[in-house]
Image (spheres, rainbow, N blue to C red):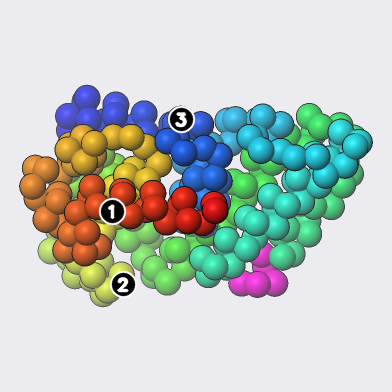
Amino acid sequence: MNFQQELFYREFVQRENEFVRAPYNPEIEFYSTIKAGNVERVKELCKVSFLDKPGLGVLSNDHLQNIKYHFVVTTALVARYCIEGGMDLSAAYSLSDFYIQKADNCRNIEEISALHPIMCIDYAKKMRNLRKKSICSKQIAQCIDYIYDNLHARITVDELAKYVKLNPSYLSRLFKKEIGTSISEYIRRQKLETAKNMLVYSDYRPAHIASILAFPSQSYFTEIFHKYTGLTPTDYRKQNFRNTLSDQS
């Protein structure tokens, strides 16, 4: 594993407000990250205090009540995104009701600020568990966690097999049976999804992203990206920028 590549990847994961087009895109990234069940990334995003969240308007002249209203809006949006991600409707709304009631009982804005990451991480953990719900074996769940935590590195079947203490051939068959795709294909798709996010939410050049995500070369990255999206990385970034501007107009 290339140490510099890992540092670049960790830098991207830990970035909080350093996005190209704030505040709209960071909001999308924030809710989408919870929806994806990316617990570690949600923890990083929540290091920015809820009180410092950009774009907090005035919903009430009472400062405490104003923050409570914004917490309600945030919680409702988190619930909506999680429902879109497959969370049961009643479960999502029951959880939002629970946290909205907790916020209503808060006596100061600091308590609400402390409650915000708890709520977000709780939803993210539930979405992560939902992603694993169809997975029968503990070893495959461990593999998926390992893949998500090491997208900056070259991940091999042998490496995963050693990690979960299974024979590589058996692990490959088990993974295909439970997930419906090969290990290499699953890893490739997750890397490409991360690359798409990096093209939208960072200013890294495609060549840099290819290196950060441990693709063999920029040309291979471009070829595979085009195969899956129908666009080159550069065109994908340009198209997303146009769509985002259209959404804001």
| Mark 3 or mark 2, whichever is nearer to me | 3
Which residue is the site of mark 2?
A: 178
Label pair 1/3, CB-CB below 8 angstroms: no
Secondary element under disc 1, as helix, strand or loop, is helix
Q: Earlier in the sequence, mark 1 or mark 3?
A: 3
Q: Is residue 92 visible?
A: yes
Residue, x 57% and y 61% (percent of image)?
81
Image quarter hosting the N terminus = top left
The residue range painted magenta reads 88-92
> Whole-percent x and y of residue 172?
18, 64
Question: Closest to the observer: 221 or 239?
Answer: 239
Which residue is the site of mark 1?
A: 236
User: Quick check: is 10 in the magenta stretch?
Assistant: no
Cα distance, mark 1 to mark 2? 32 Å
Q: Amino acid at mark 1?
A: Tyr
Q: Is residue 30 visible?
A: no
Q: Earlier in the sequence, mark 1 or mark 2?
A: 2
Crowd class of label 1 (few under 14; some 14 to 19; many from 20; radius 10 Å): some
**Residue 18: assigned label:** 3
Q: Amino acid at mark 3?
A: Glu
Q: Amino acid at mark 2?
A: Glu
Cα distance, mark 1 to mark 3? 20 Å
Residue 40 falls left or right of residue 234: right
